[in-house]
Amino acid sequence: MPQTVEVADTYRCSPRELFDVLTDEGYLAARSARFAGTPEPPSVHRNGDEITLVIPRRLPVEHVPAPFRTLVGDGHLVQRDVWTRPEEPIQGRWTAETSSPGLDLGGRMSISASDGGSHYSVSARVAIPLPLIGGPAEKLVAKQLQELFVNEQRFVGAWLADTGVGSG
């Protein structure tokens, strides 16, 4: 059965300020340097109201138990975040293109107004439709994604504080 994960946090800036940071190439490069596990830089593509972020990543497969390694391959994937609504609530979706045909990763992102700031949530759906090992593998991937989401949201908070966004 597919696993779902959701992580949310609040920040002391407007939803638009947060959105601008999350789609900023400087921020994305710094986040990728910290969490992506690959030297390949992310890219930002703007087309009207739609913004697509292409983020190469390498999953830390050394922590994946041997029976599940065939599901993640060499760990390289490309994450695509597509933000399609620049007005509040700001909505987006993400997918991951992997070398494993049995791994289906994707989810949603949302930024909305919150008391004096913004609320940012990221969700994921992990599906590995394989008998016997699919369920345990889904739980493992979901746990790793939850940790990544938490760490990336902490990074957003630190970035906002360091750059002074929302402090004025």
Image (cartoon, grey):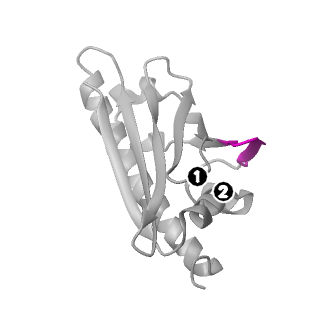
Q: Nearer the viewer, residue 26 or 77?
A: 26
Q: Three-letter amino acid code at disc 1?
A: Glu
Q: Disc 1 marks which residue?
A: 87
Q: Is residue 40 visible?
A: no
Q: Residue at x 61, y 66 (%)?
A: 17
Q: Residue at x 54, y 69 (%)?
A: 14
Residue 42 position, x and y percent, is: 70, 47
Which numbered dot is residue 16? none
Direction from residue 114 to residue 26 in the image, left or right: right
Please check the rendered image and state whether residue 53 is part of the magenta-colored stretch, yes or no: yes
Residue 107 position, x and y percent, is: 44, 37
Q: Is residue 29 visible?
A: yes
Q: Residue at x 27, y 22 (%)?
A: 133
Q: Earlier in the sequence, mark 1 or mark 2?
A: 2
Q: Nearer the viewer, residue 145 or 6?
A: 6
Instruction: Label 1, secondary structure: give it.
Output: loop
Report the residue that reaches farthest toward the top.
Answer: 131
Q: Residue at x 29, y 22 (%)?
A: 134
Q: Callout 1: few (<14), some (14-19), or many (20+) C-alpha neighbours within 10 Å? A: few
Q: Quadrant of residue 16?
A: bottom right
Please check the rendered image and state whether residue 65 is part of the magenta-colored stretch, yes or no: no
Direction from residue 135 to residue 10 in the image, left or right: right
Q: Quadrant of the C terminus?
A: bottom right
Q: Which residues are magenta?
A: 40-54
State how far apart marks 1 and 2 are (Cα). Answer: 21 Å
Q: Three-letter amino acid code at disc 2?
A: Leu
Does residue 114 sit above or below 48 in this rendering? below
Residue 63 position, x and y percent, is: 39, 44
Which numbered dot is residue 28? 2
Instruction: Label 2, secondary structure: give it.
Output: helix
Q: Magenta span: helix, strand or loop, mainly? A: strand
Residue 164 position, x and y percent, is: 62, 81
